[in-house]
Image (cartoon, rainbow, N blue to C red):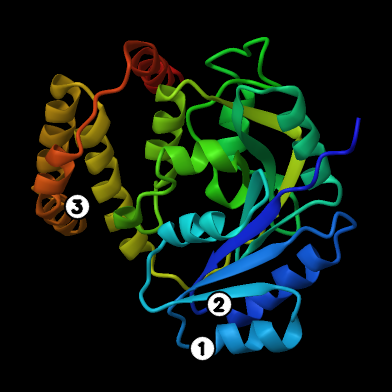
Amino acid sequence: MPTPAPPSVVIATRDRRDQLLMVLDRLTALAEQPAVVVVDNASRDGTPAAVRVSHPQVHVIELRDNRGAGARTVGARHVDTPLVAFSDDDSWWAPGALSAAAELFDRFPRLALVAARTLVGDEQKLDAVSASMAAAPLGQPADLPGPSVLGFLACSAVVRRRAFLDVGGFERRFGIGSEEALLAMDLAAAGWGLAYVADIVAHHHPLAGRDPDVRRRRVLRNELWTAWLRRPAAIAAASTWEAVREAATDPLARAALADAFGGLPWALRNRRRLPARVERAVRCLEASP
């Protein structure tokens, strides 16, 4: 049988020109020679021009506004390969990882997403999310290549393009911060499998400098939106009450709550409860250590 083609690599970026160029050096040096697409979220530091000069083989899509994680969906729509691997402007794939992932998708037709083992920094420390997925609280179905998961790190995931786009990709309103949960739920609700595979490796070298309060505010908002969009009414109400209690003593949580309520009409219009089997899996994860 012919060797399956490696995934295209899609990177969403904003104002991280120098770090992105280093990542592109690593990706374009891979033996698999994947097609690489950079989707620029309206950078102000000359990122698109710098990429075109230093890496002319990389396709650049310039957005007029910052779509956050939604930029990844733009990139996935642009490519024509059956698989898409996501990197960030501070992450890249280990040699051989993309080819190995392609073989898994060829062997496991229900597989929609591979969550890679993510090694952090020069020390190559195992990311805490990878460690949690490796513990396999949801078990390992026979038709998946690793433990079943309902979450992942967007900077180190490979998706089946058709499945990803069929469920809408990453929600543009979420920006960057806990955007993975809603996508994972929607893929599982559509009957697809998501698996953690330790043999597929990605590297992540997160940079300091981004305001952690801005990200935390966005994460709190997105977690509440996810509850409103997909969880049973009782759980959505409990999540809201907990957010209200936290907001009483935490100004940042109060701002996040206001952000969330600003999107309440949109969330209610788009509310779609998870199938019972997926809701049970979410609760299992919530109850695990």
Residue 222 in the image, given as x and y percentages of width and height: 29, 47
Answer left or right for 201 relative to 131. right
Circle 3: residue type? Ala
Badge nearest the viewer, 1 or 3: 1
Q: CA distance from mark 1 to mark 3?
A: 31 Å
Residue 253: assigned label: 3
Tag 1 residue:
45
Which quadrant is the N terminus positioned in?
A: top right
**Where is 141 relative to 220, above or below?**
above
* Label 2 vs 1, first from the N-terminus: 2
Can residue 149 be seen here? The reply is yes
Q: Residue at x 85, y 59 (%)?
A: 30
Residue 132 image point, x, y percent = 56, 29
Q: Which tag, 1 or 3, sits closer to the chain's start?
A: 1
Q: Residue at x 39, y 46 (%)?
A: 178
Q: Which residue is mark 2?
A: 16
Q: Name the foreground residue: 155 vs 75.
A: 75
SS state under label 1: loop
Depth check, front residue: 165 or 66: 165
